[in-house]
Amino acid sequence: MINITNLSFNYKNNLPIFKNVSFSMKNGIYGLLGENGVGKTTLLHIISGLRFPKNGNCRVFNYESAQRTPAMLSQLYFLPDEFHTPSMSIGSYAKYNAVFYPHFSKEQFNSYLNEFQVDGDKNMMEMSFGQRKKAMIAFALALNTPIVLLDEPTNGLDIPSKAQFRSILSSLFTEDKCVIISTHQVRDLENLIDPIIILDQNQVLINNTVEEITQKLYFSRTPSKPQDALYTEQILQGYSSVQINEIQQESTLNIEVLFNAAISNKAKMRELFNA
Amino acid sequence: MDFKSNKPIYLQIVDFCFQKILLKEWQEDDRIPSVRELGSLLQVNPNTAMRAFEYMQAADIIYLKRGTGYYVQKGAIKQVLRLQKDEFFENVLPETFESMKLLDISIDEVIKRYKKYKN
């Protein structure tokens, strides 16, 4: 659904964010991970046509995203981490903006607002950040665009709202959708995001499904430190480790450990996943 | 939902369903929640929920009626008990043995405690 080829991008000439990067995204609830400043938000901007590649291209359903054609824009919605909301209710906001999106569902919109306990008639300027965020998430998800880009959606959400968010996302996901969630709050979204993308300086380290990752890597928690682990960290119960999955054992992906393992063994990860 | 860390999530979902069957919340020939409903309830990726359903279907615990959904197979309880017994011997017991080794507990000592527990 999204094809990125030979993409290069930089804000300052000597500081490339992406350097000749190629990868594609199909259907799935993608988790976009990476250290601060590595270019997660920039990537979402490029996909949604808010920033232009310096070199190479980004195609969304075969439309060049930089051309911002209405045909492409009607199939994609980007919800930034922080946003400015006009002085109106989310209900009116939806009335004026949903017209650009052919699959918007008023019923879904109302049911999400209801679940999040957001008043659809209250002026958003009088709402807290978390309430505003929930209002906009309800709007974004009710648009039913095949591509949804969410930048740190769980930031500012209270404890029950995070669970509701996961629940809604799981229930509305279909095979023809590509949801990309950029986040640092991996624990908020563990078990939900699949595939996983890990961005590194100028590069994509991992862009694989959870199944592919656990086929190649074995995650364990053991009282004693395993030998030849790729990465180990001390935890209360002993050691949490990542090993090469040589004997094809099933294990549960631990995203935090995967992330730490990936950024401390970049060369090995590239060898494992880009072969 | 609180998942354990060492067991694949889809198998933990299978355990969740097994419990519903053993507790008779889901009875033979009852329709069980859909993949989507269960995924949403447990807040997991729908593909993970799907994998749990495929596993249970292959293990003869549930069956698919086209167009209507998944149902609990006849004799599912017996099958669940058999699978969980296998798991006990394959996974739970070895862990106990491991702890026994670490703590230097003899099998005689365990037998003694077991007899006391039975009475």
Image (cartoon, rainbow, N blue to C red):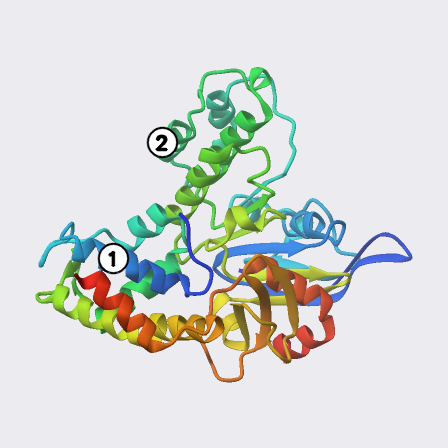
Asked where in the image residue A206 lies, by quadrant, the reply is bottom right
Determine the residue located farthest toward the right in the rendered image. Answer: A14
Q: Position of residue A132 (x, y in %)?
A: 55, 26
The amino acid type found where label 2 is placed reads: Ser
- Tell me what residue is drawn at x 38 percent, y 56 percent: B46
Q: Nearer the viewer, mark 2 or mark 1?
A: 1
**Image quadrant assignment for residue B115:** bottom left
Q: Is residue B31 left or right of residue A208?
A: left
In x, y percent, where is residue B39?
A: 35, 52
In contact (CB < 8 Å): disc 2 and disc 1: no
Say which of B110 and A127 sits in front: B110
Chain assignment, label 2: A
Quick one: SS at disc 1? helix
Pointer 2: what residue?
A111
**In the rendered image, which quarter contains the C terminus of chain A?**
bottom right
Q: How many marks?
A: 2
Distance from the alpha carbon under mark 2 to that under mark 1: 28 Å
Q: In the image, which disc is placed on residue B37? A: none
Looking at the image, the residue that sits furthest to the bottom is: A247
Residue B26: image location, x then y, percent = 15, 53
Left or right, residue B58 beside residue A244: left
> Compared to A200, does A118 lie above or below?
above
Q: Could you tell whether A98 is left or right of A59 in the image?
A: left
The residue at the point 9 percent across, 59 percent down is B28
The numbered disc on residue B17 is 1
Amino acid at pointer 1: Cys
Q: Nearer the viewer, residue A58 or B48?
A: B48
Q: Chain of mark 1?
A: B
The reply to whether residue A228 is in sight is yes
Q: Is residue A6 visible?
A: no
